[in-house]
């Protein structure tokens, strides 16, 4: 049994029994499965888009949904989509939105008019680490050379990745802090999603690109970019890129993703949505998506997930304050 499969089963074992044995409310009552709207607070091609469409496909495959309609609302680390979701879908029992650590960072750094108190965190789905890549024609052979140049002339290294407050943006600031590079000398270009960042890397617009490993994996596999470092504590399957720790920079940061429901739902409606997500997570279709995208399964549902989000928000706020981003 692979470590990924084993970790998935261990995570499921920690869930409440009702979650493991329940089916969707529609299936129990003989009703027609609902039609969901799933808001993806990012443009097409990035990690949130991949996650949203994968969980939507699994909802349909599991029978928990008859259809899933996707709405991409990118920008500002997901907070534009958050505001539209909170305002447009309050009280809608068939609405979901993808969320994650990037959105928390966006709220902390951007201070949008809508916060997490306007939605209900429903379930954590996956965790993922970032990868830093170089264009195929980069003058740098590896990340060690990039870091050496970054220390000597910080502004000459043009970093790029997700929106301000994204995990790769935070990682760059953590690298700078570890190397005693002043944060104001960081040259970072934010993009609205992993797809745009990938295009910028392949076009040679950036010195170094950063994103979730799954977002860049197809381009790495096809040699359109070179993986040179990862933000995990150990090397990731599918690449021989060293960790930043191996390179002498003590930086480890992950990027979890999940889904939330709108505010204003009745307890029974929240329970039904949670059961639908659980049915999707147990489907063969979802497990195939985990393997295909090299995602680390990390399910956590209901009240424990809400508590996790609140704790993660405070922890991330502390990191961003120290990095000078909040």
Image: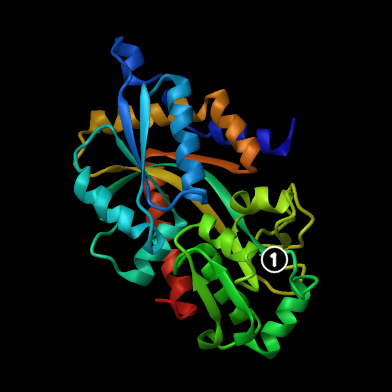
- Please name whichever residue, 193 or 122, is drawn nearer the observer in this view of the structure: 193
Asked whether, in this view, residue 324 is left or right of residue 120, the answer is right
The relative height of residue 134 versus residue 223 in the rendered view (above or below) is: below
Relative to 149, is 97 above or below? above
Q: Quadrant of residue 234?
A: bottom right
**Residue at image mark 1:** 135
Can residue 62 be seen?
yes
Q: Where does the image place residue 130, in percent across and percent down from the top left? A: 61, 59
Residue at 61% from the left image edge and 44% from the top image edge? 296
Give the farthest residue toward the front: 203
| Residue name at image x 23 percent, y 44 percent | 263
Instruction: Determine whether, in the image, residue 248 is placed left or right of residue 153.
Output: right
**Percent of width and height locating residue 219:** 67, 52
Tell whether 114 sits left or right of 139. left
Q: Please, what secondary structure does the residue beneath circle 1 have?
A: loop
Q: Is residue 186 above or below residue 163?
A: below
Locate the C terminus by quadrant.
bottom left
- Residue sitting at x 60%, y 64%: 210
Residue 17 visible (yes or no): no
Left/right placement of residue 65 relative to residue 169 reads left
The image shows a total of numbered marks equal to: 1
Sort mark 1 into few (<14), some (14-19) or many (20+) by Cα contacts within 10 Å.
many
x, y percent for residue 195 = 53, 55
Image quarter hosting the N terminus: top right
The percent coordinates of residue 65 (x first, y second) are 37, 24
């Amino acid at each position: 049994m692979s470590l990924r499969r084993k970790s998935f089963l261990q995570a499921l074992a920690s869930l409440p029994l009702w979650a493991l044995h329940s089916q969707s409310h529609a299936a129990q009552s003989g009703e027609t499965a609902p039609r969901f709207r799933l808001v993806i607070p990012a443009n097409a091609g990035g990690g949130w888009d991949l996650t949203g469409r994968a969980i939507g496909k699994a909802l349909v495959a599991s029978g928990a949904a008859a259809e899933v309609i996707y709405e991409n609302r990118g920008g500002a680390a997901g907070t534009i989509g958050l505001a539209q979701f909170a305002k447009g879908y309050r009280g809608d029992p068939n609405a979901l939105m993808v969320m994650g650590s990037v959105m928390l960072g966006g709220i902390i750094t951007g201070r949008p008019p809508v916060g997490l108190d306007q939605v209900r965190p429903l379930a954590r789905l996956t965790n993922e680490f970032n990868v830093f890549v170089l264009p195929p024609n980069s003058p740098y052979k590896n990340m060690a050379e990039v870091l050496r140049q970054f220390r000597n002339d910080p502004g000459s290294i043009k970093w790029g990745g997700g929106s301000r407050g994204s995990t790769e943006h935070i990682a760059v600031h953590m690298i700078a802090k570890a190397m005693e590079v002043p944060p104001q000398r960081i040259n970072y270009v934010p993009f609205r999603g992993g797809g745009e960042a990938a295009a910028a890397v392949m076009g040679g617009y950036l010195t170094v690109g950063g994103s979730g490993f799954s977002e860049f994996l197809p381009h790495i596999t096809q040699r359109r970019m070179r993986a040179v470092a990862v933000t995990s504590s150990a090397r990731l399957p599918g690449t021989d890129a060293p960790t930043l720790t191996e390179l002498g920079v003590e930086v480890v940061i992950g990027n979890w993703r999940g889904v939330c429901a709108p505010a204003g739902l009745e307890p029974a409606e929240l329970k039904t949505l949670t059961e639908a997500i659980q049915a999707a997570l147990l489907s063969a279709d979802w497990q195939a998506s985990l393997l295909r995208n090299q995602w680390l399964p990390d399910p956590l549902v209901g009240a424990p997930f809400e508590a996790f989000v609140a704790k993660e928000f405070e922890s991330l706020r502390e990191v961003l304050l120290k990095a000078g981003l909040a």
